């Protein structure tokens, strides 16, 4: 009998689902809008009924259902099964695992969404077959996760892998976490726009960029050779390389996988990052190390959810 596993990726606006075989083959996937009304208290029931309905539609019987793995944007205590804080969803100290397990009557496991995107890439994407993978996602902000010797590292409050909140500038820009100089304030969409505003105030000469330019405009201008844009991208690349060099020295991964919306900037981003990284990293940590872009796109989280459930079930 074939067994199936469900991966769920809860996002601020939509929630994605996928049904997988233990070998990582995706049978079906779908999404629903995330219901954050009343601090998302009614949403777990909708997640459960959506899974139930699809498994019925696919003809997957009760005894063929192994379990569910769920990624949530926020700080998660996986062992206790509690979402400590998911600001964009509304859950605070919320017992998500128990609530879903009761509604579905199969084992449920939860973790941070960036951790599960890392796990998905490690399982079926860019990190495939590598024992240790460092994953960084560049969207509006910066997320990350790491698999070391085949194990997802989380920590008791789920802060492991939060590379966006590693410090890169002493007494630097104020971050949403309340500290100064976090990587997130210098790279990804948010950081690039802050850098642009700083440079525009300094009047660095003529440029097609203005107050309302987005990160992708900055990359495009850099690609076209604009001096201001090139400077902003190179600064961001330097800080990103700085944080990655420290992380790589500590973790000694075989692969660094870059994902998220900003990674669409491709080689305009990767080339300066790798160049700075080569100069900054401990030489021994750079042997057997490769950079790669994420391959699973928006599906990384559902793959990671399935992987988590399989792993925790000992398969
Ligand atoms: Zn921070």
Image (tube, rainbow, N blue to C red):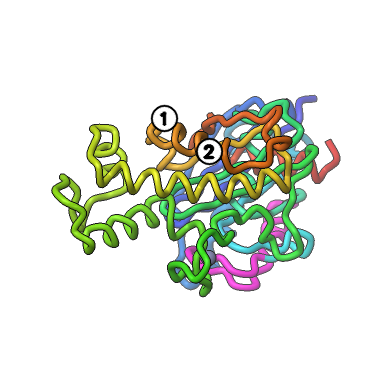
281 relative position to 88: left or right: right
Q: Which residue is nearer to you in this view: 290 or 35?
A: 290
**Which label belongs to residue 267?**
1
Q: Is residue 242 above or below residue 119?
A: below
Q: Is mark 1 within 8 Å of ligand 1?
A: no
Q: Residue at x 27, y 37 (%)?
A: 220
Mark 1 neighbour class, 10 Å CA radius: few under 14, some 14 to 19, many 20 or more: few
Q: Which residue is nearer to you in this view: 310 or 100?
A: 310
**Which label belongs to residue 258?**
2
50 relative position to 188: left or right: right
Which mark is first along the chain, 1 or 2?
2
Q: Residue at x 43, y 51 (%)?
A: 187
Q: Is residue 44 above or below residue 119?
A: below
Q: Residue at x 49, y 71 (%)?
A: 171
Element marked by disc 1 = helix
Q: Is residue 56 visible?
A: no
Element marked by disc 2 = strand
Q: Is residue 279 visible?
A: yes
Residue 147: percent from the left, percent from the top?
72, 42
Write the start and end of the magenta stretch as one range. 83-105
User: Viewer-nearest of labels 2 and 1?
Assistant: 1
Position of the N terminus, as image quadrant, is top right
Q: Which residue is nearer to you in this view: 130 or 19?
A: 130
Mark 2 vs mark 1, CA separation in Å: 12 Å
Mark 2 neighbour class, 10 Å CA radius: few under 14, some 14 to 19, many 20 or more: many
Q: Is residue 89 in the magenta section?
A: yes
Q: Residue at x 68, y 67 (%)?
A: 95
**Mark 2 in CB contact with mark 1 (< 8 angstroms):** no
Residue 64: percent from the left, percent from the top?
76, 34
């Amino acid at each position: 009998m074939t067994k199936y596993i469900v991966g769920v990726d809860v996002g601020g606006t939509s929630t994605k689902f996928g049904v997988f075989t233990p070998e990582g083959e995706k049978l079906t996937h779908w999404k629903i809008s995330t219901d954050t009304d009343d601090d998302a208290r009614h949403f777990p029931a909708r997640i459960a009924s959506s899974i139930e309905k699809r498994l019925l539609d696919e003809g997957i019987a009760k005894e063929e259902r192994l379990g569910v793995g769920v990624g949530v944007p926020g700080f998660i205590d996986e062992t206790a099964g509690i979402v400590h804080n998911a600001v964009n969803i509304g859950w605070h100290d919320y017992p998500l695992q128990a609530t879903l397990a009761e509604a579905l009557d199969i084992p449920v496991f939860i973790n941070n969404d960036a951790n599960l995107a890392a796990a998905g890439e490690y399982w079926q994407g860019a990190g495939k077959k590598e024992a240790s993978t460092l994953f960084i996602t560049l969207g509006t902000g910066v997320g990350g996760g790491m698999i070391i010797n085949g194990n997802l590292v989380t920590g008791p409050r789920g802060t492991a892998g939060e590379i966006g909140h590693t410090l890169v500038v002493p007494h630097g820009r104020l971050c949403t976490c309340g500290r100064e100089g976090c990587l997130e304030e210098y790279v990804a969409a948010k950081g690039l726009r802050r850098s642009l505003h700083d440079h525009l105030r300094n009047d660095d000469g003529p440029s097609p960029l203005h107050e309302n330019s987005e990160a992708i405009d900055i990359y495009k201008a850099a690609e076209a050779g604009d001096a201001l844009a090139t400077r902003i991208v190179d600064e961001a690349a330097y800080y990103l390389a700085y944080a990655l060099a420290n992380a790589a020295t500590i973790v000694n991964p075989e692969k660094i996988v870059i994902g998220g919306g900003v990674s669409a900037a491709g080689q305009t981003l990767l080339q300066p990052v790798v160049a700075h990284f080569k100069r900054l990293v401990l030489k021994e940590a750079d042997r057997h190390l490769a950079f790669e872009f994420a391959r699973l796109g928006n599906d990384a989280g559902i793959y990671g959810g399935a992987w988590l459930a399989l792993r925790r079930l000992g398969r």
